[in-house]
Image: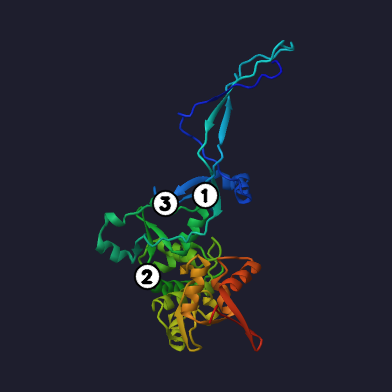
């Protein structure tokens, strides 16, 4: 090749772009380098007009289009792989041409997803007798694949949410066990475990099911879903404190954000616990689920239902209570920013601090 010669470059603007650029953030690099994460890598979306998500096994990233004015070209060579290698130095080197395809302007940015997994579209299962009486409803007939298609998150995140919602598959269709059914079965479950002398720390589904079926006709899948929800391992180490917490949250949620007397709620919560359990109800078990407008009242306020936008969240919090102790408000901010420095920055921007007799109070700015 003589001096001054270049590489031939061919551009065909009529060729439709077939590629998109994705910015490789550190989190994406970790996902790609993990064999388990990469093996489950896929793009998901809840619909044609819904945001797209890049999902691994346990992590989910939302894709966001970043526009730019620079022209981006993807180059490919047409060199033949069949050319023979020789020891002879050619008199002239011939360079193969390059072919360029224009890429869409901009690239895709990957943001760690904070999507709240919503399984409310999955119908409730109220029990075998009610299911048989109601018959089949085509509009409510969902499979596990249907659920996965409508919830754009990683497999691990979906499975965790499914267990928390007490999802169950019966006759090929999926449901969420209703609160009424849980409240009916849990006392029977606890009594059967105690009557058979089983260890709450090591329960086996087959043994528990055989004990429960003497008094209950629900399928084994229902018993397993309840055990999984309140267990800390797959051998079903039943966490009775977690069960008591769930009962407390459900008792509180029945009042649908209405202010009620604290004394009445605590009494109702304690009465909901199975008698075989020796447990004490404590409000610390419900952290991040309630607010106390006054020392003698309580109101349901789950942090998971608050706006993700910091300004909107503080507005909702101060609408529920004008002045908070620092330790009261922190559980409602931890899912926005997990680093303490960043939480302090949020408090400085959207609220004001005041120290009274050694206690730090958080109030609305400008008040």
- Nearer to us in this view, 162 or 54: 54
Q: Nearer the viewer, mark 2 or mark 3?
A: 3
First along the sequence among labels 3 and 1? 3
Q: Nearer the viewer, mark 3 or mark 1?
A: 3
Name the image quarter holding the N terminus: top right
Determine whether the residue tagged by mark 2 lies in a helix, strand or loop.
helix
Residue labelled with disc 2: 181
- Nearer to us in this view, 220 or 181: 181
Q: Is residue 357 left or right of residue 301?
A: right
Q: Disc 2 to disc 1, how far (Cα)?
A: 34 Å
Circle 1 Cα neighbour tier, 10 Å, few/some/many (<14 / 14–19 / ≥20): many
Q: Position of residue 157 (x, y in %)?
A: 51, 57
Q: Position of residue 19 (x, y in %)?
A: 51, 36
Circle 2 Cα neighbour tier, 10 Å, few/some/many (<14 / 14–19 / ≥20): some
Residue labelled with disc 3: 50
Determine whether the residue tagged by mark 3 lies in a helix, strand or loop.
loop
The mark found on residue 55 in the picture is 1
Q: Is residue 323 visible?
A: yes
């Amino acid at each position: 090749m003589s001096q001054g010669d270049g590489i031939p470059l061919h551009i065909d603007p009529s060729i439709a772009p077939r590629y998109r650029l994705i910015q490789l953030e550190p989190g994406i690099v970790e996902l790609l380098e993990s064999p388990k994460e990469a093996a489950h890598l896929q793009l998901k979306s809840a619909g044609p007009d819904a945001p797209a998500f890049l999902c691994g096994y346990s992590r989910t990233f939302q894709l966001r289009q970043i526009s730019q004015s620079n022209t981006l070209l993807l180059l490919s060579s047409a060199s033949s792989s069949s050319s023979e290698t020789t020891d002879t130095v050619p008199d002239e080197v011939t360079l193969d041409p390059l072919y360029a395809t224009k890429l869409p302007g901009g690239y895709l940015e990957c943001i760690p997803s904070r999507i709240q997994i919503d399984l409310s579209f999955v119908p409730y299962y109220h029990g075998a007798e009610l299911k048989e009486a109601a018959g089949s409803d085509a509009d409510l007939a969902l499979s596990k694949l249907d659920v996965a298609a409508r919830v754009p998150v990683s497999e691990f995140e979906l499975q965790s949410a499914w267990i928390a919602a007490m999802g169950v598959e019966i006759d090929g269709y999926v449901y969420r066990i209703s609160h009424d059914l849980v409240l009916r079965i849990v006392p029977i479950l606890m009594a059967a475990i105690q009557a058979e002398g089983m260890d709450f720390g090591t329960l086996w589904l087959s043994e528990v099911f055989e004990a429960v079926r003497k008094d209950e006709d629900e399928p084994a899948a229902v018993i397993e879903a309840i055990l999984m929800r309140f267990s800390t391992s797959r051998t079903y180490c039943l966490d009775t404190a977690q069960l008591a917490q769930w009962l407390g949250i459900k008792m509180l949620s029945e009042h649908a954000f209405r202010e009620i007397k604290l004394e009445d709620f605590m009494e109702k919560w304690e009465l909901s616990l199975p008698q075989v359990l020796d447990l004490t109800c404590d409000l610390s078990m419900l952290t991040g689920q309630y607010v106390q407008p006054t020392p003698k009242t309580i109101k349901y306020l789950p942090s998971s239902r608050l706006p993700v936008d910091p300004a909107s969240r503080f507005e909702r919090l101060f609408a529920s209570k004008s002045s908070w102790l620092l330790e009261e408000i922190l559980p409602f901010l931890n899912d926005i920013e997990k680093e303490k420095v960043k939480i302090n920055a949020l408090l400085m921007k959207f609220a004001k601090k005041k120290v009274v007799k050694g206690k730090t109070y958080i109030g609305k700015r400008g008040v």
